[in-house]
Image (cartoon, rainbow, N blue to C red):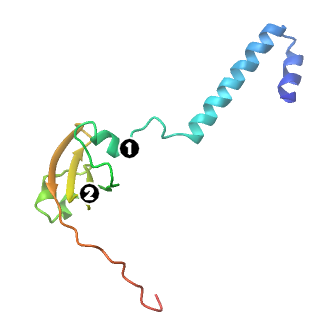
Amino acid sequence: MKAITKVLNRLKLSNRSRIVIVLIAVVLLLSAAGYILYPRAHQSSLTDIVSKHMVLPDNESPAELTIVDKTKIKTQFLKKSENGDRVLIYQKHQRVIIYRPSIDRIVDVGVVQIDDVTPIQRRQGQ
């Protein structure tokens, strides 16, 4: 703050001009800090976007996937997806949802059966 005061004294501005310049500097600093600290505050999560199209289970967090290379997809259900599509998988509710961001639409909803996955222990030496 002292540095700003020194600069303003050298410029020989009126008190009113000094106050305006200080207020503008404070607003700019707060805006920059907000953008740096909270860059995703204005972006919606995938579940928020999809929940605008359908009711989602509220007691489970889904696994989220993005289709990167549709030529490698082997399941018949996911063959309807395109590169860039997003997939929500609710294991407990046995539901899978394909969402296409490019058109803001749900492409398909289906049932999925996922067995409990147990972690594989690493062999010694790995």
Q: Is residue 67 visible?
A: no
Q: What type is the residue that disc 2 sits on?
A: Ile
Disc 2 target residue: 89
| Image point (62%, 33%), residue name | 32
**x and y percentages locating residue 33 in the rendered image:** 63, 36
Count the marks: how many? Answer: 2
Q: Spatial distance from mark 1 to mark 2, Cα to Cα? A: 15 Å
The residue lying at 16 percent from left, 45 percent from top is 107
Percent position (x, y) of residue 106? Answer: 19, 43
The label on residue 45 is 1
Closer-to-camera residue (16/112)? 112
Query: Dot 2, how many residues are within 10 Å of its Cα: few (below 14), some (14-19), or many (20+)?
Result: many
Q: Earlier in the sequence, mark 1 or mark 2?
A: 1
Q: Quick one: label 1, few (<14), some, or many (20+) residues within 10 Å? A: few
Q: Is residue 20 visible?
A: yes
Please identify the residue farthest to the bottom as the structure is shown. Answer: 124
Element at label 2: strand
Rendered position, 24 above or below 14: below
- Marks 1/2 in contact by CB < 8 Å: the verdict is no
Where 10 sits versus 106, above or below?
Answer: above
